[in-house]
Image (tube, grey):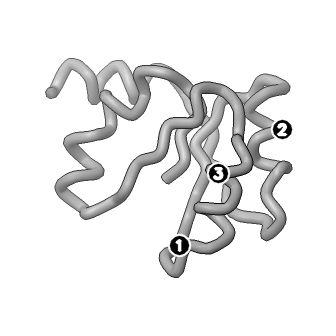
Amino acid sequence: MVIEKEGIADIVAAYAHRYCVALVHTQGRLTEYGNDLIEESSSPVVILTDYDAYGMQIAEATINKIPRIGIVCAPLMAMEQRY
């Protein structure tokens, strides 16, 4: 899972570990290395972004179009309180 926003990876890390999901934090930009990692992965990849221009650019920047999951803050805050 490629994650745009700082801090979100920390919030979902416990769930990711439980279900063996690798997390990659982009710090708001998709680098060439990040794009290569996505394109060369043999596993399913999704992008977790918010609905601002940068989030949409990250989702559209990949050569192979991959699913984009939008962030809604309320569920993430509930997850953070549980862990």
What residue is pinned by disc 1? Answer: 44
What residue is pinned by disc 3? Answer: 33
Single out the mark in the foreground, 2 or 3.
3
Outermost residue, bottom direction? 42
The answer to whether residue 37 is above or below residue 28 is: below
Image quarter of residue 39? bottom right
Residue visible at 83% across and 50% down in the picture: 61
Residue visible at 50% across and 37% down in the picture: 25
Residue visible at 70% across and 64% down in the picture: 66
On-image quarter of the C terminus: top left
Mark seen at residue 57: 2
Dot 2 surroundings within 10 Å: few (below 14), some, or many (20 or more)? some
Residue 55, position as x, y percentages in the image = 74, 33
Image quarter of residue 21? bottom left
The residue tagged with tag 3: helix, strand or loop? Answer: helix
The residue tagged with tag 2: helix, strand or loop? Answer: helix
Dot 1 surroundings within 10 Å: few (below 14), some, or many (20 or more)? few
Mark seen at residue 32: none
The residue tagged with tag 1: helix, strand or loop? Answer: loop
Residues at discs 1 and 3 in contact (Cβ within 8 Å): no
Query: Of label 1 and label 3, which has the lower sequence position?
Result: 3
